[in-house]
Amino acid sequence: GAGVSQSPSNKVTEKGKDVELRCDPISGHTALYWYRQSLGQGLEFLIYFQGNSAPDKSGLPSDRFSAERTGGSVSTLTIQRTQQEDSAVYLCASTASWVETQYFGPGTRLLVL
Amino acid sequence: EDQVTQSPEALRLQEGESSSLNCSYTVSGLRGLFWYRQDPGKGPEFLFTLYSAGEEKEKERLKATLTKKESFLHITAPKPEDSATYLCAVQAETGANSKLTFGKGITLSVRP
């Protein structure tokens, strides 16, 4: 079946611009996660959605970062007023429930000039 | 705070030369330890989940083991196609979310 998909694959933007990154989870998966992978660093948790519950935003690095999940499916991660330190690979993962394996998408490679 | 340390950072092997990758962890109650493989420009690909000390899982040339403090990913007679970055992550029993805490990964290169 189809896996997790993310778009765009690559995004180049100028410092100060806003960007939106999209994640389409595996059909039927109720839990969705966003992680960030910076050069030389491990994956860093950003935000977690589970069903209709309020999202866990504890990993968001600043108030410039926000995310939403519409209809319990597609999620969008928005970064406002991008900074060069936001350059990274943004990965989305989904799972059928929190006790199940997280399956990752291919990521969006963001470069802020 | 949960922590994962992987060693070595990079490993170069000759084809057929078996070795092991180490993942040391501290976590407030382990629900699961996960191994993923990541190829350049791709997202992590799931390999194994281990839940309790003494557990072992195998897939082709890979075997993952778990103790109370660390996990090993043993690679037997590796082939060039095994070249990738191997990621280890832990999930805690407690906490409001089920996030994974990752190590920085081990980059494996297998020469033909």
Image (cartoon, rainbow, N blue to C red):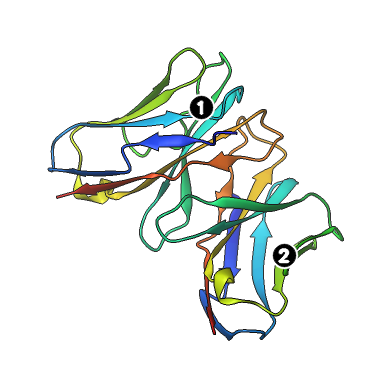
Residue in the foreground of this view, choosing between B20 and A44: B20
Residue A56: which numbered mark, if any? 1
Q: Which residue lies at the image location 64% right of the left edge and 34% below the top edge? A: B95
Q: Residue furthest right?
A: B54
When asked about the image quadrant of residue B70, the answer is bottom right
Q: Badge 2: few (under 14), some or many (20 or more) residues near its Cα, within 10 Å?
A: some
Q: Position of residue B50 (x, y in %)?
A: 77, 52
**Chain under label 2?**
B
Q: Which residue lies at the image location 57% right of the left edge and 51% below the top edge? A: B45
> How far apart are the alpha carbons under marks 2 and 1?
28 Å
Q: Are marks 2 and 1 in contact (CB under 8 Å)?
A: no
Q: Position of residue A73 (x, y in %)?
A: 50, 20
Q: Which residue lies at the image location 66% right of the left edge and 31% below the top edge? A: A98
**Chain under label 1?**
A
Residue in the foreground of this view, choosing between B38 and A40: B38
Q: Secondary structure at mark 2?
A: strand
Q: Are marks 2 and 1 on the same chain?
A: no
- How many labels, in total? 2
Q: Which residue lies at the image location 59% right of the left edge and 56% below the top edge? A: B3
B89, above or below B98, in the image: below
Quadrant for the N terminus of chain A in the image = top right
Residue in the foreground of this view, choosing between B18 and A82: B18
The three-letter code of the residue at mark 1 reads: Asp
The three-letter code of the residue at mark 2 reads: Glu
On the rendered structure, is A6 left or right of B62?
left
Q: Position of residue A41 (x, y in %)?
A: 42, 59
Residue in the foreground of this view, choosing between A93 and A42: A93
Q: Secondary structure at mark 1?
A: loop
Q: Badge 1: few (under 14), some or many (20 or more) residues near its Cα, within 10 Å?
A: some
Residue A44: which numbered mark, if any? none
Q: Would you name the residue on which mark 2 appears?
A: B70
B109, above or below A98, in the image: below
